[in-house]
Image: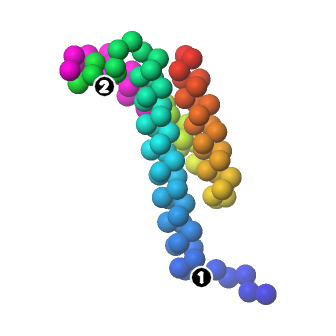
Amino acid sequence: MNTTTSLAGVLGHGALAIVSYAVLGVLLLVAGFYVVDLATPGRLSTVIRTDRNPNATVLATSSVAGVALVVAASIWSSGGELREGLLATLVFGLVGIAVQTLG
């Protein structure tokens, strides 16, 4: 029984993991922004771009950074298991967005 793994297999699995986590992370970041947008009066992107409101910019930035920290911590703690790591990242990301919105 041969337990060695080819370099192409390792690189392919690693590339799949990077793309999968990147796509999931971006989707969670976008979802987090729009959930905060729904929880605030007015359209957040309009308040930032048109009204040039620095407080809205800080709110949007901090919400995206908060979701990014949750996603990064979940990816880091995944332990190399892609399927379980993606599921944990999705669940923790959604919980983080919900808690952030309630806060």
Q: Could you say whether the residue bearing mark 2 is in a helix, strand or loop?
A: helix
Q: Which residue is mark 2?
A: 45
At which x and y percent is residue 54? 27, 18
Colouring scheme applied when the structure was drawn:
rainbow
In space, the residues marked 1 and 2 are separated at their CA atoms by 47 Å
Q: Which residue is mark 1?
A: 6
Q: Amino acid at mark 1?
A: Ser
The one of 41 and 81 positioned closer to us in this rendering: 41
Quarter of the image for the C terminus: give it: top right
Q: Main secondary structure of the magenta part?
A: helix
Question: Which residue appears at 66% of the width and 56% of the height?
Answer: 83
Q: Could you say whether the residue bearing mark 1 is in a helix, strand or loop?
A: loop
Q: Which residues are magenta?
A: 50-64
Q: Quadrant of residue 63?
A: top left
Q: Is residue 14 above or below residue 1?
A: above
Q: Which mark is residue 75?
A: none
Question: Which residue appears at 55% of the width and 29% of the height?
Answer: 97
Tell me if residue 35 can be seen. yes
At which x and y percent is residue 61? 37, 28
At which x and y percent is residue 5? 64, 80
Q: Quadrant of residue 59?
A: top left
As for residue 63 lying within the magenta part, the answer is: yes
* Residue at the extreme right: 1
Dot 2 crowding, Cα within 10 Å, few <14, some 14–19, many 20+: some
Side (left or right) of 69 relative to 55: right
